[in-house]
Image (spheres, grey):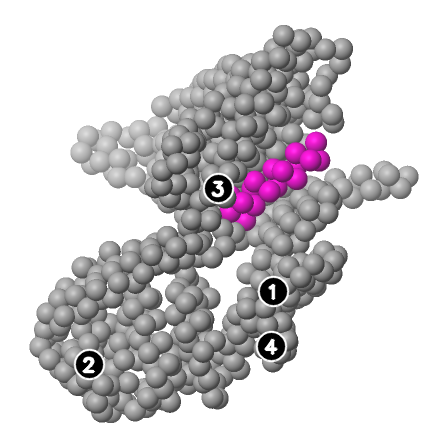
Amino acid sequence: MTRSIRFGVLAAALAVAPLAWAATKAKTKPDAPVGFDGAMRFFYADKFEEAAASLFRYLVGAGDSGDKTENARFFLAESLAKLGFHYAATEYYYDIAKVRRAPEFVAPSLAALEKITRERPFDEVLIVDDLIYDSPFGTVSEEVDDWLRYNRGVENFRHGLERWAVESFAGIRENTHYWYKAKYVEAIWNLRTGGAPEDSIKILASVIDAPAADEEVKNLARHGYARLLFEKGDYLESFKAYDKIRGDVRTAASILLEKAWAKFYLGDYRKAMGLLLALDAPIYKGFFAPEKYVLRAIILKTYCHYRAAKAATAAFRLDFGKALKTIRERTNLASVPEIYDAAVQEGELKRADAFLQTLLIEKGTIGDFGAWKAAGLSKHLDRMYTLKANEMKRRIAGNLKDATRRIAESLLDFEEQMNILDYEIGLDLYKRIRAKPSATTGAEEVTKIPKFSEDVYYLFEGEYWVDEFHDLSFDINDRCVE
Amino acid sequence: MRHAAPRLVAAALALGLAWGVAGGTARAAEEGGVAYAIQPRTFLLSHEFDFNVGVLPMDAFYKGVALGASYTYHFGEAVAWEVAQFTYSINVDTPLLGRLRNDFQVEPIPEPRLRYIGTSSLVLKPFFGKMAFSNRSIIHIEMFFVVGGGISKPSSPAVYPTVDIGAGLRFFGWKHVSFRFDVRDYVGFDGFHPKHFLCISIGVSPAFGDIRASREAKKAKGDEG
């Protein structure tokens, strides 16, 4: 919990302290109206379901003019957040911070919003555009100020207001989470404005090497750093940088795919094939990666494994056949799951889709809280979530057109490549015997698997273990000389 | 029953190896190659101490509560030498003797009871793997086989030359601590008469040193030379 949340909750707690002592004796029925004091008794007894119902009932009764309206809003938000309804909590925190009827609740609400935005998908338009970018807040804690400055800086960059963006970033305290995130944004901005990639690489390297930077920011920087080195053609260093990414993000499909490309360019086809195999894991179902079929077919063809290479091209047609048919029929591209999933795989659409999924999950649990029905909170939340979900669907649909067209074009490109590969595989079948092995590196050597070694060789039998994704390697023998 | 355990272990091992070899040969010919997850062994320690507690359950007239300790030097991934192993048995009478005396007026001829055993053994560690624990975490395990010799001291004045054979499972907890489950058959020879002392024990094994690091150091030294 950040400092400002603590201060806010402490202040609020002092305001209702006389009520808290009776918390453990609270025997009031959750259905009965208990007023604000009764609601606080529930809250301090950690009965958040009953607290939320009572606070909502109080808010409905008292309206905007109640003595404790802002207190009730804040503690309703707190109760909802504790129960996992982060979007609903966000709406109440937003209202408190935006309208500022009770200044003592503004700072803790902002701190709570900062925590939500850091940990989970959120409504960027509501929080960043409407609240942060558009509202002055007066005195807030240093942590919240860093968060506000970072978001204002990013928004200014997005609007092309570089000087204001730099000014916003300049106020962030050094060596903090948002200071390092701002460095990352600066590196990206440098590239956007045509700056030298080396400058961005330097900025990202400084974040990676900073002892004070947390792992989340470091991973972000490592990913950017690895991508820039890849673009420079330094595949070895790029792969090493990818390999240093840690935590849950390490298993992200995009990282595996990019590592496979790096290994492919380094000529280590076995490792590349292993990483591509990891992408077939059920966890990555829906990840748009037609490159994996192309890469796989090229590598298998290189080693004269023609049947397997053909199988790779056939798998592409099987997985994307429906999508390709839709593209040719010129019907609604977004109606095809493969194309929709691919379109929401990156950037703003990815974040919006993640927020939509979160909304739907949270909405699905409203019915679990029986005490809310009589108070009318279930109905209220259901309406709130439905409206927001519909808004998000409209927002996504509005931005989907360009993305789906891009995906469609890339799919057609890949299909073309597959056709060429199919043709080449067919040709190679008739000139199979060559003077020497075909592979370009030491990869054609037969893997020597020692009986015992410092490395353990787990034969892959179709069972995917997340801890093995980055360690999979293919044992392909060169059949071109058989 | 006493003799079943070693035979079962040997049969299981033979079956397992045969199955593994057959599977590997079949897969080697697959189109497109075969895939391996190649991961560095997380646990490669050289000096292991073990402190265990167990039971000698086989004698109907008494049960032994075994307290043991050992030191093992690991040469590498597959072979180790259990330099010294000592087990002391605190023997507890079962009600059987009293019932024979009181209910049936029978005085059985007492068999010598085990007091302690000291052995030195070769340890073979062909199996290493991992298990998913409640779909939450991964536990690394090792299965090992032990064969060796030493002495066992029964309650009689004699000292038996002893052969020691057994198997065990090791669960790796932290880098320097593992937990062991051992089943051993100590066969003491009273002349030509074998006396079996089956011991089942669990233990905790702190370990030190790093085989990988010492190999690298040796290699570096060799390169310098």
Look at the image and give the residue range highlighted in magenta.
A250-267
The percent position of residue A353, horizontal first and vertical second, equals: 39, 54
Q: Which residue is mark 4?
A: A164
Q: Amino acid at mark 3?
A: Ile
- Which residue is depicted at the point 29% across and 58% down? A390
> Which amino acid type is shown beneath numbered disc 2?
Leu
Task: Name the chain letter of the residue that bears numbered label 1.
Answer: A
Pointer 4 or 2: first along the chain: 2
- Report the magenta stretch's main SS: helix
Tell me the SS state at disc 1. Answer: helix
Q: Residue beneath label 1, please?
A: A185
- How far apart marks 3 and 2 lie (CA) works out to 48 Å
**Near-viewer residue (A208 or B152):** A208
Tag shown at residue A407: 3
Q: Name the quadrant containing residue A9.
A: bottom left
Residue B186 is labelled as none
- Tag 3 and tag 2, C-beta contact below 8 Å: no
Secondary structure beneath dot 2 equals: helix
The mark nearer the N terminus, 1 or 4, is 4
**Which residue bears the numbered disc 2?**
A59
Going from N to C along the chain, the mark reached first, 4 or 3, is 4
Q: Is residue B5 magenta?
A: no
Question: Cα distance, mark 3 to mark 1?
Answer: 26 Å
Q: Residue B102, image x and y in percent?
A: 20, 36
Q: Amino acid at mark 4?
A: Trp
Residue at position x 66%, y 54% from top?
A225
Inter-mark Cα distance, 4 to 3: 35 Å
The chain holding disc 3 is: A
